Image (tube, rainbow, N blue to C red):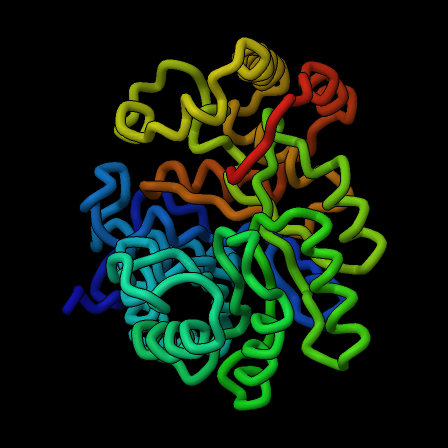
Amino acid sequence: MGADIRSIPLSSTYLGHFNMQYRRLGKSNLLVSRLWLGGMSLGSPSPRPWVADTATSTRMIAEAIEAGINTIDTADAYGKGESEELIGRCLHDMGVRDDIVIATKFGLPIDGNKPNRSGYSRKNIVQRCEAALKRLKTDRIDILQTHIWQPDSSIEEVIEAFHHLVRQGKVLYVGITDMAPWQAAKWIFTKSFDGLPPLISVQHHYNPVWREDERFLVPLCEAEGVGLVAYSPLGRGFLAGAARGTTREKTDDFIAKFYGRAADLAVQSKIEKLAEKAGVTPAQLSLLWVLGQRFVTSAVVGPTNSKQLSELIRCAETKIAGEIFDEISATYSPRMEVGHG
């Protein structure tokens, strides 16, 4: 068992309750904070050495909640359930479960390659939901989301399985992550005709060096009233400043895979120069650029320590001139090929 969260003091960098803003998610009446605390960096440094340990993760959850963040996003694949377990334990010990929106994802294999233990069969969806409820120490998941989508999956079967869980009261809202626009459109219109639970959110890879969803997915979601939640707003730390020498920079192979173009380095350099001019950090400016896009409801942040968390929370009360955002936007170079981010 982890330490009782009430026995862990807040760090010296803790900022107190900032003026956190909230928005409705999609067409729902659910209010979510503009910043979501991401669970990928919470739990245990094994097997990802950059993930915060239990004590640090516990402290960050407390600090995030005290600062006004009311939504925590996780997935059963994060630490093979360790992230969900930690979040569930913390919220239980703090006695704040009813005040927090829990969003979790499923679909990736976490038990090897056994048939029906990954993907989007009705069998696996129900089983994974039941398991997540136990780890999160709750009787319902506020937002259940698909994780990395498998293109050959039956959207109709997934929607029907979600409907089953919603009717049981185990899931309140449904969302998706990283789905091709035509498939997202099929989901939206299938539920419209069949009276099934509406899609309220899409989590998508979005930041100043990855903007491909502006082509089709963003216009679709804007037109249909689906909330857009940006993950990797700092590009896995790539946009937080060059040569920081963090453990994640040294061990996360996806940084070079996703952001290895000369054009990406140009955006990184531009942000660093403009951040100095604006009197903010590169991480803050990158996050503010994301939050400044009219279609972005919220952004999922994944700090690995309290100092990083407090740096990002400060964005809640920071104003940046639109001309600076325009300069960042103008530096972007579209990608020839796109895939999961």
**Which residue is found at the position 18% from the left and 46% from the top?**
46
Of 29 and 152, which appears nearest the observer? 152
The relative height of residue 141 versus residue 269 in the rendered view (above or below) is below
Who is closer to the viewer here, 302 or 253?
253
Of residues 112 and 248, the one nearer the viewer is 112
Residue 180 x %, y %: 65, 47
Which of the 4 image quadrants contains residue 293?
top right
Res. 194 visible in picture: yes
Residue shown at the point (51%, 38%) measured from the top left: 341
Location of residue 160 by image quarter: bottom right
Q: Residue furthest left?
A: 1
Q: Report the side of 169 relative to 254 (left or right).
A: right
**For residue 171, above or below residue 287:** below
Residue 197: quadrant of the picture = bottom right
Number of dots carrying numbers? 0
Residue 19 visible to an observer of this rendering: no
**Rendered position, 59 above or below 321:** below
Most extreme residue toward the right, as rendered? 223
- Residue depicted at 74% across the width and 73% down the height: 191
Q: Residue furthest bottom?
A: 168
For the N terminus, the quadrant is bottom left
Position of 198 compared to 317: left or right? Answer: right
User: Where residue 84 sits in the image (x, y, percent)?
Assistant: 33, 64
Q: Position of residue 153 (x, y in %)?
A: 55, 61
Q: Is residue 123 left or right of residue 20?
A: left
